[in-house]
């Protein structure tokens, strides 16, 4: 069966460090992968999209990598700040399905 | 100037009742979605509409019926509510489905069935 896996344990890091979150998937051949941020009581907010022919994408302090051989995406936040504390979700669109399937998310806590 | 707005934000109702959740987007997107987020925070697709046409209908009980009067609105009607329907329901929209454009989500409707 198709699966998207994110580390369900919370990630705690110190302010200023780089946070790295992992998204693994099986039995998909996605054309792209997306990352979202969700704060408590709010809807997910789109952050970044990376396509299958792109190895890396950057946006300000965010960096996403996409390894279609390993079936893995890494999401990095450099110089992390307490305001980065949230749950981060990866999502992809199984070919032909035309709707995003989301991972369960990883909660990031940045300590001041 | 809210992009995707859902009403109501909170809904508490008794088992067996029928209720509706409304969603509107002012982004000009052509595709709208309903997602359910359960107590474990897992987001699951329920329905999607593209230009008022139903394109995804996941394994959802028949008690759930989406309605799209125009491409800016997608409402969700739930009949005979059950305890297990308690969850947060999110509406979302995107442009050009399948191209990878990011989704814009509403702030959610927390449904509690008692």
Image (tube, coloured by chain):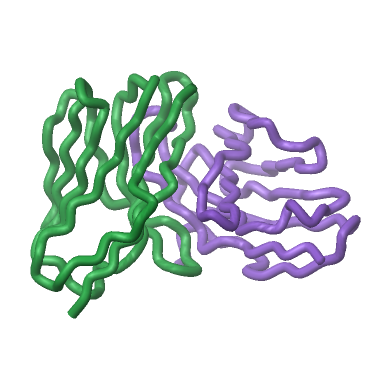
Chain colours: A green, B purple
Q: Quadrant of residue A112?
A: bottom left
Q: Residue furthest bottom?
A: A112
Residue A96: give x, y in percent of width and height.
46, 19
Count all numbered tags in the image, as a single digit.
Answer: 0
Q: Quadrant of residue A4?
A: top left
Q: Quadrant of residue A32?
A: top left
Residue A68: give x, y in percent of width and height.
22, 24
Left or right position of A82 against B72: left
Residue B41: give x, y in percent of width and height.
51, 55
Q: Residue furthest front?
A: A9
A112 relative to A34, above or below: below
Q: Residue at x 41, y 46 (%)?
A: B103
A16 relative to A29, above or below: below
Q: Nearer the viewer, residue B74 or A35?
A: A35
Q: Residue at x 41, y 42 (%)?
A: A103
Residue B96: give x, y in percent of width and height.
41, 33
A31 relative to A9, above or below: above
Q: Nearer the viewer, residue B43 or A9?
A: A9
Left or right position of B27 against B47: left
Quarter of the image with the C terminus of chain B is: bottom right
Quarter of the image with the N terminus of chain B is: bottom left
Q: Residue at x 40, y 28 (%)?
A: B98
Q: Residue at x 71, y 42 (%)?
A: B66
B95 relative to A87, above or below: above
Left or right position of B101 against A75: right
């Amino acid at each position: 069966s198709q699966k998207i896996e994110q580390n369900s344990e919370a990630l705690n890091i110190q302010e200023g460090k780089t946070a790295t979150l992992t998204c693994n998937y099986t039995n998909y051949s996605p054309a792209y992968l997306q990352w979202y941020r969700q704060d408590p009581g709010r809807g997910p907010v789109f952050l970044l999209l990376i396509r299958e022919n792109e190895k890396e994408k950057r946006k300000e302090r965010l960096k996403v990598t996409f390894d279609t051989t390993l079936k893995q995406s890494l999401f990095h936040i450099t110089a992390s700040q307490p305001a980065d504390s949230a749950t981060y979700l990866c999502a992809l669109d199984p070919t032909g399905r035309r709707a995003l399937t989301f991972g369960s998310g990883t909660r990031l806590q940045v300590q001041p | 100037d809210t992009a995707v707005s859902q009403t109501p934000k909170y809904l508490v109702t008794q088992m067996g009742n029928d209720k509706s959740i409304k969603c509107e987007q002012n982004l000009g997107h052509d595709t709208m979605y309903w997602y359910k987020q359960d107590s474990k925070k897992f987001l699951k697709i329920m329905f999607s509409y593209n230009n008022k046409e139903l394109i995804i209908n996941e394994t959802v009980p028949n008690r759930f019926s989406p309605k799209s009067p125009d491409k800016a609105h997608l409402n969700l009607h739930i009949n005979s509510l059950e305890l297990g329907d308690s969850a947060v329901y999110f509406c979302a929209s995107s442009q050009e489905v399948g191209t990878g454009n990011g989704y814009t989500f509403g702030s959610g409707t927390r449904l509690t069935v008692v």
